[in-house]
Image (cartoon, rainbow, N blue to C red):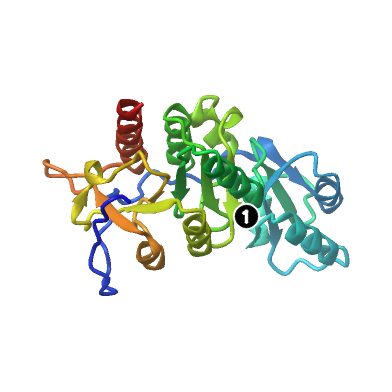
Amino acid sequence: MPKLHKSPRDGTAFRSPFPAHNEREDSAATEVDHAIYGLIPVLEALRSGHRPLQQITIAEGARHERLKELLELAKVARVPIHRAPRLVLDRLLPGLTHQGVMARTAASGYYDAEELLERLAAMMNTGQQPLVLGLDAIEDPRNLGAILRTAECAGVDGVFIPERRAAGLTATVAKAAAGALEHIAVARVTNLVQLIERLKQLNIWVVGATGDASANYTQWDWTVPSALFLGNEAAGLHRLVQERCDTLVRIPLRGRIESLNVSVAAGVILYEALRQRSEKK
């Protein structure tokens, strides 16, 4: 059993080890070429399931009898719905008849979360040591893409991201990932806290990265089945996510800047895991 390094659980705010988010881009505006607009085209995309949808935007106040069907299909397909003023859609789709409905297509399909968990369980049953990555509300698509590229290179066996308030597998992410989306399993979940409990049931240790942890990331035994959780660019890990982690680790900093970019932090920690695992082999 690995030695745990616990941090205080007094409910106070934790300082994020990652930078304030200053690279946010309007991915909807930059990826209109990857959009489907109009009620019927979006409905047909949901019905067929051939093109994975990242998000559906509906104009506020839109009234149409078939919107109910769209909302029901989106719920079944677990496609997030976003409400926005009609002027936003008019600006994104100038001169086009969008009927108050627009969907952004994903650059890659998502793995089913249950199937990915079953795959991890199968690895555990055969004596393998899964390395998992959980991302808590990473909003910048370029950060997400860079993290996924590093994760694939480091041999991560699965990545979990939230369905809402986080970047998804957009074209910008695919470009930053430089081909990694073709080789790494990414699943969306509705609740990271519940995911952590499921990982623990599989006997996978959950390690959160935060600037206030008492232990360095090198002190954790990454040769055991481990799931690394990284937090939002500005706020870090949510409090409930931190509290559910088995242990918290930090990356020591010697300069005057208070934090690393989250994609850099992912690379530092994941390659420490790879180093330890390579040496053990």
Q: Quadrant of residue 272?
A: top left
Disc 1, SS: helix
Q: In this rendering, would 217 be left or right of 82?
A: left
Residue 14 in sight: yes
Q: Is residue 17 above or below residue 58?
A: above
Residue closer to the observer: 221 or 113: 221
Query: Residue placed at 58% from the left, 38% from the top?
Result: 185
Residue 190 in percent (x, y) is at: 58, 61
Residue 138 in sight: no
Query: The residue under label 1 is which amino acid type?
Result: Val
Q: In this rendering, would 234 be left or right of 198?
A: left
Query: Residue placed at 42% from the left, 30% from the top?
Result: 154
Q: Is residue 246 above or below residue 49?
A: below
Residue closer to the observer: 77 or 171: 77
Q: In this rendering, would 279 be left or right of 140?
A: left
User: Could you tell me which quadrant the C terminus lies in?
Assistant: top left
Residue 176 in percent (x, y) is at: 48, 30
Residue 275 in percent (x, y) is at: 31, 29
Q: Quadrant of residue 241?
A: bottom left
Query: Residue placed at 55% from the left, 44% from the top?
Result: 125
Residue 171 in percent (x, y) is at: 59, 35
The residue at the far bottom in this view is 10
Residue closer to the observer: 179 or 248: 248
Q: Residues within 10 Å of mark 1 (few under 14, many from 20)?
A: some
Label 1 sits on residue: 88
Q: How many marks?
A: 1
